[in-house]
Image (spheres, coloured by chain):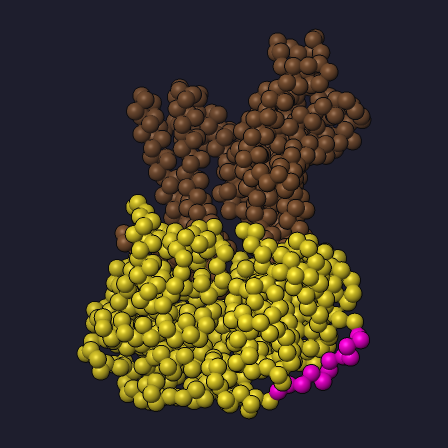
Amino acid sequence: MTDATTAVDAVGSPDAQPGRTRRGARLSEWSALYAMSIFAALVLSAILVEATGGDWRPVVSALLDGSVRRPGRWGETLATAAPLLVVALGTVISSKAGLVNIGQEGQLYVGAAVGAYFGFLIGGPGPINVVLILIIGAAGGGLWAGVAAGLRYWRGVPEVLSTLLLVTVGGQAVAYSLRWEWLLLAPEGRRGNRNQVSEQLATDNRLPRPDFFGNEFPLTVFISVVLAVIVAFALSRTVWGFRLRMLGRNPRAAQRSGVSETRYGAMALMLGGAFAGLAGAAMLTGGGFAFGNYQMVPGFSANIGWTGLLVALVAYEKPLAAIPVAVVFAGLRTGSSFVGSTGVEGRITDVISGLLVLALLIPAAVMLLRDRRRARAAATERV
Amino acid sequence: MSHSELGDAGTGVTNSSPVPAVQLSGIAKRFGAVVACDNVDLALARGRIHGLLGENGAGKSTLMKMLIGLVLPDAGTIAIDGKTESIHDPLTASALGIGMVHQHFSLVDALAVWENVTLGDAGRLDPNATRNRIGEISEQYGLVIDPDKRVGDLTAGLRQRVEIIKCLRRDPSIVIFDEPTSVLTPEESEQLFESLRHVVAAENRAVVLVSHKLDEVLHATDDITIMRQGRVVDQRYSTDADAPTLARAMVGREVSLRSERAALGIHSLDDTDLDDVEPVEPDTVLPATAQPVLRIDRAVAHDADGVVALDEFSLEMHSGEIVGVAGVEGNGQRALGDVLSSLLTLSSGTVAVDGAVVPTGKSGAMAEAGIGVIPEDRHDSGLVLDMTVAENLVLVDQSRAATRGLIDQRRLHAFTEEMIEQFNISCGGPTAPMWSVSGGNQQRVVLARELSQEPKILVAAQPTRGLDVGAIEYMSHRLETAAASGVAVLLISSELEEILELSHRIIVMHSGRIVGEMSRAEANFETLGLLMGGAAA
Ligand SMILES: Nc1ncnc2c1ncn2[C@@H]1O[C@H](COP(=O)(O)OP(=O)(O)OP(=O)(O)O)[C@@H](O)[C@H]1O
Ligand SMILES: [Mg+2]
């Protein structure tokens, strides 16, 4: 290894990218990579199950049952995919501007809590209140990310740190508000046997859940797909998206061209937060048993923020690609909830779904790493 | 057009050693519809320096990248010292003793020179050993540099030295230089090639030099290969070549002698033919009473480290004049360009366009006021490599391709096709990503964008960097037409010929100040040279 520099240059040089003719080759390369890593994860999981005294066949079967096969399950999977997708779309927006927002979990949680607070406070007539909750939820998430934006552009605190820290702070804040009746805590008689829970949204304050062949899911599924199309269009076809991408790819060219880093960057970060907040409000109003059942509870965000971030990563920052990726991640989630019924220990189930998520991430991570190197080299190349 | 002087190109120039160090045979490479290399045969002999010439986009860099394993050939073979090798990555190339200095820099601004030199090395770093090695190379090749300087603070010429040292540090026996001298002064490149010549002879190395400076190629090389549109169109000994013939072979037509002078990079302080250069009289310059289109008033600016870059710099420009800024690199030229690109905020002083003060450092303000900029470093603020050619053409002003906030793809593509045609940009089409475009063609994209925007003031910093002789001719013509149509052109160049050829008025910068000012008629190499060195006017 006398000459690793040239290797770095090799991957790093923008000119090192293969031409269009090799795009097909690359695609199959990546497919192979995906197939390999998923297969490896499955084999590892099977070994794990067998080693702990189980049988791997029923586990696979349970995964499929839980995600698609059993009646009503694919509806549940889509219902889970929707907030994942919305979070991922926000993440795509902030990363296009060159920002690393990793605080979606907190933005989602705060968004949902703020939405819930004002929803109960206003308590207007049905549909209007639902829309209000969604809008306020988005605003809440956006403002929460706005704190990070403020820290970044006026104090120079890297957004990677601040967004992450704000997850913890947000978690504490919501937990606190769930302890006080003047905030979110439901009045004494309506808490059931729980002590940190908000009231349930009135039936007319919930998103409709249409039913397809015995599969029901909230309207958010459609909303999220429409949002994906809008985001894809906005990023590729509008002047705004053009300028955002410019900022992400070459901040100095952007500065000269009138794309203010403060304005566009803060906007992108806050939009990312707003999408996460919207996802939270959608989980609240779209409900389903998996998401707190129309009320705020501790742990309401249920890792949807983190997983949504992963979806964006695996989708390689492409809004439309995030749709299928979100469905796959959602399927993993709904599927593994069935694995417990095979008698396999809960912790093993967690490890298995962890392995599968990892399998989905590895190719993307390789891809991202390559891209980062290229981007960095591009940024530092001089004539 | 035939492989005239060298006989069969397959065997090439082999007079110093029977087996060529490198033998490329039948090399082909396509990128989609673009044929970058087409059945190329090339032999590099040990103990000789081989010049590789060709228009922008002729395939020179691509061919060289195949030698270093950055690009894989579609067809053909590469033999090193007679043995056929498959060079599929740079590690293989480096194991075979092949090193390359790339056309574009790949340095990390935030790191020191010595750190950049060791970048990517495995194992523990030994700063002192590296510093010593840098010292040795500096001495041997005349590339003096302070190993502890931060690369971000270096001028383009010094960065180029770092790149060269980075390559030579490993003592490659086959060295490729892809336009290494576009940012070096003629003296520097002369010294570099002088010392290379000794090493090449003494240690039997093989060297390739890609360059657009015909004069330099003629002096530094032993053999010359000329490429056009991916093919080898001529091979000859340097002793049998002269600049006009080379230019004709490259471009396929006669190139006017005057701009050839700039392209050739003839720099000599006692150039007596200078008077042949017809002085350009600024007949369009307005009377002194007219309001200047650009007025910089006692501008003070500091660079990232707080060092004064502009020191009470004042300048007035009138519409229609070309003002040449002469000076040794690193005397505030970059800061001047940055201020006029809204990239640097003045500590004191003002910039006014048409009498209206423009806030400095406010994003987009200068562009809005009508200042176009061809930056000295196209990758810095001139281009977004990850966006397409079409997008890069409307980087500063999207309005010509947008309706109510939406990009109109049809109009964008029509405009792009027009620019590609007008500026002869060779690329894979409007949607080709910028990084896939050859260096000279990237420069053309910047020129096309800035000129098409019809600025009031055009800052052109090293506008011809990386361009081939034909394009330089076209560029000079475009700058003159722009001035004739009323644009005030501020030409910042490290090539005195370029300044003398185009400018109506010349200012000399030293330590962030103007130390001399004269009309073109008064200017000559000698006075300029003295002023650039810091002598009082
Ligand atoms: N990775 C790539 N993808 C697509 N096209 C490419 C790629 N690399 C080079 N090309 C195309 O191949 C052609 C040859 O490019 P190359 O960089 O070899 O030119 P060059 O002779 O070095 O020109 P210059 O003098 O401008 O540096 C160009 O038309 C360029 O657009
Ligand atoms: Mg090149």
- Bounds of the magenta span? B279-290
- Please tell me whether residue B140 belongs to the stretch shown in magenta: no
Spot occupied by residue B176 in the image (x, y as percentages of width and height): 35, 69
Front residue of B407/B446: it is B446
Q: Is residue A57 above or below residue B26?
A: above
Q: Name the residue located 25 percent from the left edge and 63 percent from the top edge.
A: B96
Q: Name the residue located 41 percent from the left edge and 57 percent from the top edge.
A: B146
- Please tell me whether residue B284 belongs to the stretch shown in magenta: yes
Spot occupied by residue A214 in the image (x, y as percentages of width and height): 60, 30
Looking at this view, name the residue that lies furthest to the front. Answer: B536
Looking at this view, name the residue that lies furthest to the left. Answer: B18
Left or right, B491 with respect to A60, comes to right
Chain letter tied to yellow: B
Total marks in image: 0
Chief secondary structure of the magenta portion = loop
Left or right, A148 with respect to A41, comes to right
Q: Is residue B279 above or below residue B411?
A: below
According to the rendering, which colour does chain A have? brown
Front residue of B397/B281: it is B281
Location of residue A46 (image quadrant): top left
Q: Name the residue located 41 percent from the left edge and 53 percent from the top edge.
A: B148
Q: Name the residue located 36 percent from the left edge and 43 percent from the top edge.
A: A36
Spot occupied by residue A121 in the image (x, y as percentages of width and height): 77, 22
